[in-house]
Image (spheres, grey):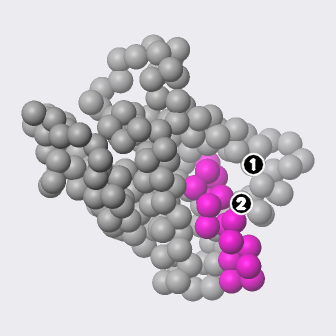
C-alpha cells in the first residue's frame, strides 16, 4: 500500500489526482523562486491572516500549493506520493480531492481564527495531515483496508510527524493538528459508500 513500485507512466495513469497535485506543487515552487513573478507568487499565495481578514479568501486555499524551500516542497510532495495513492484508489478521484483540499482549507481556517492577525504561513502540511486523519478513521472503522504491516507503518509515521510538529521551529502546529482532525472528521462521509472488503 505504501511501497511504490510503479514506473512513472503507470503512476500517472493510476493516480491522476496525485500526479496533478505533485505537478502543481513543483510548478508553483519554480514560479515562486525563478523569474520576475517570484515576489508576486509569494505575496498573493501566502496565507496571511491579515489579508484574509480584508476579504482575500483565496488565501485559505493557495498556501496548500505553495512552499518556501526545496526541502519543504520535496518533503510534502514525497509524503503525498507515498501516502496519497492508496486513498485515491479507495475513495476515488472526486472524494480524494474533497478530503485533501477540505482538510487543508479547514486547517487554514483554524489558523486564521486561532492565531494572531499578523501570522502568515504556506505549505501543504495541513492537507497531508488530513490524509493521516482519513487513515486513522480507516484504522478504527474500516480496518479491512489496512494490513498489519501498513498499520504499523502508518502509526510510526504519524507519531514521528507529530513529534516533529512540536519540535521543529516555524511549524504551524495548529495547521497540522486541525488538518489531522479535519481528515478524521471528513472520513466517515468520504467512506460512507465505499464497499466493505471481506
Q: Residues within 10 Å of mark 2 (few under 14, many from 20)?
A: many
**Is there a contact, CB below 8 Å, between mark 2 and mark 1?**
yes
In this rendering, the answer to whether 169 lies above or below 119 is above
Determine whether the residue tagged by mark 2 lies in a helix, strand or loop: helix
Q: Residue at x 45, y 23 (%)?
A: 14
First of labels 2, 1 by sequence position: 1
Q: Is residue 165 visible?
A: no
The disc at residue 32 is: 1
Q: CA distance from mark 2 to mark 1?
A: 9 Å
Whether the magenta-drawn stretch holds residue 61 is answered as: yes
Determine whether the residue tagged by mark 1 lies in a helix, strand or loop: helix
From which residue to which does the magenta span run? 52-70
The x, y position of residue 175, in whole percent, is 46, 68
Q: Residue at x 78, y 55 (%)?
A: 41
The x, y position of residue 144, in whole percent, is 13, 39
Q: Residues within 10 Å of mark 1 (few under 14, many from 20)?
A: many
Q: Which of these two is toward me, 108 or 166?
A: 108
Would residue 20 appear left or right of 129 to someone viewing this image?
A: right
The disc at residue 45 is: 2
Rendered-image quadrant of the C terminus? top left
Q: Is residue 182 visible?
A: yes
In this rendering, the answer to whether 30 lies above or below 189 is above
Amino acid at each position: 500500500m505504501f511501497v511504490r513500485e510503479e514506473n512513472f507512466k503507470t503512476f500517472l495513469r493510476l493516480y491522476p489526482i496525485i500526479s496533478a497535485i505533485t505537478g502543481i506543487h513543483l510548478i508553483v515552487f519554480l514560479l515562486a523562486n525563478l523569474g520576475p513573478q517570484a515576489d508576486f507568487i509569494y505575496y498573493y499565495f501566502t496565507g496571511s491572516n491579515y489579508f484574509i481578514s480584508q476579504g482575500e479568501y483565496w488565501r485559505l486555499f493557495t498556501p496548500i500549493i505553495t512552499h518556501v524551500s526545496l526541502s519543504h516542497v520535496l518533503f510534502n510532495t514525497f509524503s503525498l506520493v507515498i501516502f496519497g495513492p492508496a486513498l485515491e484508489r479507495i475513495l476515488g478521484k472526486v472524494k480524494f480531492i474533497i478530503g485533501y483540499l477540505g482538510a487543508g482549507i479547514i486547517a487554514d481556517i483554524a489558523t486564521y481564527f486561532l492565531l494572531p492577525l499578523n501570522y502568515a504561513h504556506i505549505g501543504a502540511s495541513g492537507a497531508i495531515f488530513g490524509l493521516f486523519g482519513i487513515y486513522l478513521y480507516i484504522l478504527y472503522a474500516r480496518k479491512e483496508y489496512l494490513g498489519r504491516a501498513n498499520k504499523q507503518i502508518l502509526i510510526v509515521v504519524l507519531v514521528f510527524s507529530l513529534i516533529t510538529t512540536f519540535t521543529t521551529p516555524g511549524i504551524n502546529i495548529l495547521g497540522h493538528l486541525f488538518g489531522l482532525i479535519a481528515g478524521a472528521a471528513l472520513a466517515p462521509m468520504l467512506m460512507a459508500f465505499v464497499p466493505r472488503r471481506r
